[in-house]
C-alpha cells in the first residue's frame, strides 16, 4: 500500500457559524416550539414521549415502547420493563467503592444511596433528558427568603458586569433597584441557541383576544428589550399613549436569560390566573409568559372562574449562534500515480498468485495480468489496455500510520493514469 502525505496547504481547519431560529408560542399553559406537532410512531402515539414545547437531548428513546410493571424502578420511580418489541434504553450504575450515583434525582438521594442500596446493586436512570423554556416570577427579591430568589441572586454580578452595555442591566441605577421591583425571569436552555443568543434577533409579543397588544425587541443590539408597539393604560378605557421606546427588560445573550421589569398596563381588561390569587391583573411585561412551565394554569385563579386566561397568549422568537469546527483535507491523485487496486477483481481471473514460496522465500507471480476495464464503443471488440482504477475509498492515517478515518465515495470515480484528480474530505470535529 502506498502512503501519500498531505501538503502544507492540504489541511485547513475552519469554524462554521450558524444561526438556528427558535420560536415559542405560549397559550393556556402549553408551550409550542417551532410549530411542531405530536408525531405518531410505529410503537407509541408520541415518538418523543414529551409534551409540546420540549426537545429531547440526543433524542434517546425515540418511538420506544412504554413502561410496564415488573422490573426495578429507575431514578424517577418508573419501571424499566417493556413489551420487548422495541425496548427502551436507560442508564445504570453499579454501586461500588467509587460511590458514584445519578445527579439531581428525587428518587435516589444521598440518604437513599447510603442506606437502601447494597454493594453491587444496580441503580437505574431514565431517558429521555429534555428541556424547554421556563418562566420564574420573582416578587420583590428584598422581601423573599433566599430559596425563592436564588436565580436572581446568582445573576447579580453578571447584570452589573453588563452595565457597561446599558444602565438598564445594573441591579441598582437611576432606573430603579431590581431588589425592590417585580421581576420576570425567562430561562432559555442552551440547547435552543448554542453558544449565545444572537443580538438583535430577540422578539417578545403579547396577544389579547387574538390582537397584538405589545412587542419588545432588542433593536439596539445592546441587550435592551425596547417596546416597539402597543399602548399604556391607566385604567379601564383610559389610554396614556403609545409606548414605543420604553425598556421592558434586558437580555443576557451568553447566559440565556430574559429579565423583564416593565410594569405598565398593556390592555384595559384584567386577566385572571396571570398570577395565583383572586385578583385580576392588567397584562404587563412582568406577567409575560404566564403558564410557561411555571405551574400557573387557569385553575390558579381563585376569583370564581378564569375564562380570561384563555384570551391571552405570548410569543418569543430569537436566533442562536452555533460554532462547529470543521477540517477540510485535500487528497491528490496525481498523474501516473494511484493506478493499482487491492480489489481482487483488479487482476485477471484464474491466474496463479504465487510464483514460489518456502520457509525462506515468498515470491508472487510476476507475470500476472491486470484485467482490462476499458470499454469499447464497438460490439465484439476489446479496447486497447490502459491503466485505470476506480477510486471508492480514501483512508486517512496519522503520523504513526494509524488508521483514523475512511472517506467513502457515493459512487466510485474513474482515475485514468494520464489525469490528475483531487478529492476534498470535510469533517466536523
Image: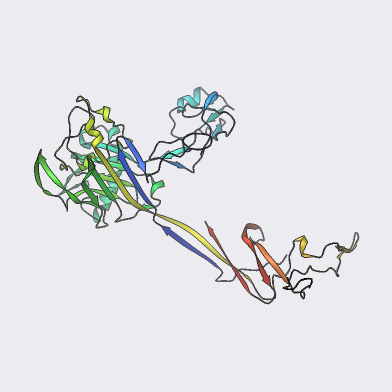
- Front position in the image: 327 or 308: 308
Judge whether residue 264 can be spotted in this image.
yes
Residue drawn at x 65%, y 57% as measured from the top left: 403
Expressed as whole percent of the image width and height from the top left, the position of residue 427 reads 54, 59
Task: Identify the image's colour scheme: rainbow, by chain, secondary structure or one colour.
Answer: rainbow
Residue at the front extreme, as displayed: 379
Residue drawn at x 43%, y 36% as measured from the top left: 50
Expressed as whole percent of the image width and height from the top left, the position of residue 224 reads 23, 52
**Left or right: 138, with 101 as reference point:** left
Expressed as whole percent of the image width and height from the top left, the position of residue 23 reads 34, 47
Q: Does residue 347 sit above or below 77 in this rendering?
A: below
- Front position in the image: 358 or 413: 413
**Left or right: 408, with 46 as reference point:** right
Q: Does residue 386 sit above or below 262 in this rendering?
A: below
Residue drawn at x 16%, y 52% as measured from the top left: 244
Expressed as whole percent of the image width and height from the top left, the position of residue 367 reads 86, 70
Q: Quadrant of residue 235?
A: top left
Amino acid at each position: 500500500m502506498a502512503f501519500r502525505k498531505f501538503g502544507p496547504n492540504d489541511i485547513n481547519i475552519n469554524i462554521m457559524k450558524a444561526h438556528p431560529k427558535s420560536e415559542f408560542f405560549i397559550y393556556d399553559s402549553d408551550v409550542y416550539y417551532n410549530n411542531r406537532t405530536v408525531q405518531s410512531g410505529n410503537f407509541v402515539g408520541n415518538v418523543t414521549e414529551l409534551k409540546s414545547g420540549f426537545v429531547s437531548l440526543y433524542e434517546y428513546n425515540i418511538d420506544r415502547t412504554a413502561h410496564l410493571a415488573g422490573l426495578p424502578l429507575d431514578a424517577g420511580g418508573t419501571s424499566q420493563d417493556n413489551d420487548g418489541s422495541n425496548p427502551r434504553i436507560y442508564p445504570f450504575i453499579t454501586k461500588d467503592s467509587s460511590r458514584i450515583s445519578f445527579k439531581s434525582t428525587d428518587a435516589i438521594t444521598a440518604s437513599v444511596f447510603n442506606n437502601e442500596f447494597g454493594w453491587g446493586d444496580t441503580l437505574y436512570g431514565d431517558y429521555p433528558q429534555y428541556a424547554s423554556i421556563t418562566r420564574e416570577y420573582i416578587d420583590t427579591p428584598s422581601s423573599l427568603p433566599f430559596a425563592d430568589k436564588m436565580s436572581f441572586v446568582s445573576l447579580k454580578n453578571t447584570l452589573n458586569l453588563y452595565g457597561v452595555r446599558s444602565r438598564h442591566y445594573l441591579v441598582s441605577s437611576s432606573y430603579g433597584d431590581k431588589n425592590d421591583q417585580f421581576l420576570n425571569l425567562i430561562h432559555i436552555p442552551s440547547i435552543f441557541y448554542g453558544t449565545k443568543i444572537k443580538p438583535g434577533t430577540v422578539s417578545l409579543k403579547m396577544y389579547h383576544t387574538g390582537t397584538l397588544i405589545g412587542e419588545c425587541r432588542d433593536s439596539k443590539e445592546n441587550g435592551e428589550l425596547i417596546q416597539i408597539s402597543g399602548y399604556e393604560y391607566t385604567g379601564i378605557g383610559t389610554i396614556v399613549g403609545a409606548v414605543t421606546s420604553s425598556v421592558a427588560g434586558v437580555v443576557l445573550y451568553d447566559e440565556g436569560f430574559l429579565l423583564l421589569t416593565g410594569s405598565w398596563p398593556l390592555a384595559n381588561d384584567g386577566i385572571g390566573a396571570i398570577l395565583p390569587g383572586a385578583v385580576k391583573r392588567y397584562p404587563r411585561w412582568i406577567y409575560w409568559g404566564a403558564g410557561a412551565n411555571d405551574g400557573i394554569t387557569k385553575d390558579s385563579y381563585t376569583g370564581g372562574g378564569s375564562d380570561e386566561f384563555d384570551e391571552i397568549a405570548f410569543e418569543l422568537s430569537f436566533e442562536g449562534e452555533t460554532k462547529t469546527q470543521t477540517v477540510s483535507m485535500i487528497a491528490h491523485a496525481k498523474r501516473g500515480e494511484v493506478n493499482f487496486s487491492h480489489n481482487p477483481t483488479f487482476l485477471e481471473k484464474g491466474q496463479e498468485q504465487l510464483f514460489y514460496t518456502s520457509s525462506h522465500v515468498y515470491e508472487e507471480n510476476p507475470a500476472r495480468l491486470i484485467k482490462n476495464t476499458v470499454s469499447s464503443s464497438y460490439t465484439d471488440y476489446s479496447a486497447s489496455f490502459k491503466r485505470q482504477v476506480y477510486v471508492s475509498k480514501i483512508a486517512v492515517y496519522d503520523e504513526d500510520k494509524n488508521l483514523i478515518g475512511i472517506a467513502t465515495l457515493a459512487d466510485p470515480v474513474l482515475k485514468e493514469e494520464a489525469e490528475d484528480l483531487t478529492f476534498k474530505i470535510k469533517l466536523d470535529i
